[in-house]
Image: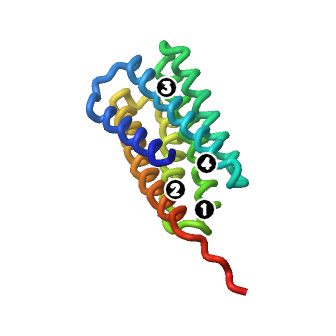
């Protein structure tokens, strides 16, 4: 699920770069769809690991929040640009904090958890920048959203591949 989320974020970022003249309405629909799908994938990931991981709830919260924001965006596609920016900023900050919490928990289990931490920090920075500079123009915001999505996508793909290797390794039993 993490790999799929990373690929989805990467593709969304590429779409932002490929079509810089996209209208706000299309951006609203694309971002709302992306946020909803990302949230649903996070919920699915949380549910599938609920029996094996005691702290699966943080991914569930991230997924529920992302899904709710996606539904809000898609329910009111005529939302103003400023409103969209603040929704995006809130989503980026919340999911970034949750990613950093997950990285802290994973540091004992995988090598390279700093990538997840870095993706969370990038998410928070993007959210803060969007909050404090909403008037920077639609194309500049589109560039930042694309950069954010591509970088988050790459980080999540690398983390997913590292986690896959970690899960595939046999668990070493401590010697007594």
Label pair 4/3, CB-CB below 8 angstroms: no
Q: Secondary structure at mark 1?
A: helix
Element under label 4?
A: helix
Mark pair 3, 2: CA separation: 23 Å
Q: Residues within 10 Å of mark 4 (few under 14, many from 20)?
A: some
Q: What residue does disc 1 label? A: 106
- Look at the image and tell me whether residue 113 can be seen: no
Find residue 48 and report its horizontal and vertical position in percent.
62, 45
- Whether residue 110 is situated above or below residue 17 in the rendered picture: below
Which quarter of the rendering shows the C terminus?
bottom right
User: Which residue is depicted at the point 61% across and 76% down?
Assistant: 172
- State the CA–CA distance, disc 1 to disc 2: 9 Å
* Side of 140 where 100 appears, left or right: right
- Disc assigned to residue 116: 2
Counting residues from the start of the chain, the first of labels 1 and 2 encountered is 1
- Residue drawn at the location 49% of the way across and 25% of the way down: 32
Which numbered circle lies on residue 163? none
Task: Kindly tell me whether residue 4 is visible in this rendering.
Answer: yes
Task: Identify the mark nearer the N-term, 1 or 3.
Answer: 3
Rendered image: mark on residue 97? 4
Q: Tell me where residue 10 appears, x and y as whole percent.
A: 37, 42
Q: CA distance from mark 4 to mark 3?
A: 20 Å
* Badge 4 or badge 2: first in the primary sequence: 4
> Where is mark 3, residue-wise?
32
- Looking at this view, is 104 or 157 the one in front? 157
Where is residue 70, by image quadrant? Answer: top right
Q: Earlier in the sequence, mark 4 or mark 3?
A: 3
- Which label lies toward us, 1 or 2? 1
């Amino acid at each position: 699920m993490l790999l799929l989320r990373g690929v989805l974020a990467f593709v969304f970022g590429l779409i932002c770069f490929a079509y810089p003249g996209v209208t706000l309405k299309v951006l609203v629909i694309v971002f709302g769809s992306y946020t909803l799908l990302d949230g649903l994938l996070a919920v699915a990931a949380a549910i599938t690991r609920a029996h094996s991981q005691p702290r699966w709830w943080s991914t569930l919260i991230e997924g529920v929040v992302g899904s709710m924001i996606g539904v809000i965006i898609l329910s009111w596609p005529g939302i103003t640009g400023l409103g969209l920016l603040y929704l995006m900023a809130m989503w980026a900050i919340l999911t970034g904090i949750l990613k950093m919490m997950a990285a802290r928990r994973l540091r004992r289990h995988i090598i390279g958890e700093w990538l997840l931490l870095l993706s969370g920090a990038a998410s928070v920075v993007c959210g803060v920048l969007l909050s404090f500079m909403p008037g920077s123009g639609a194309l500049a915001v589109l560039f930042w959203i694309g950069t954010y999505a591509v970088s988050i996508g790459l980080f999540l793909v690398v983390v997913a591949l590292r986690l896959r290797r970690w899960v595939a390794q046999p668990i070493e039993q401590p010697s007594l």
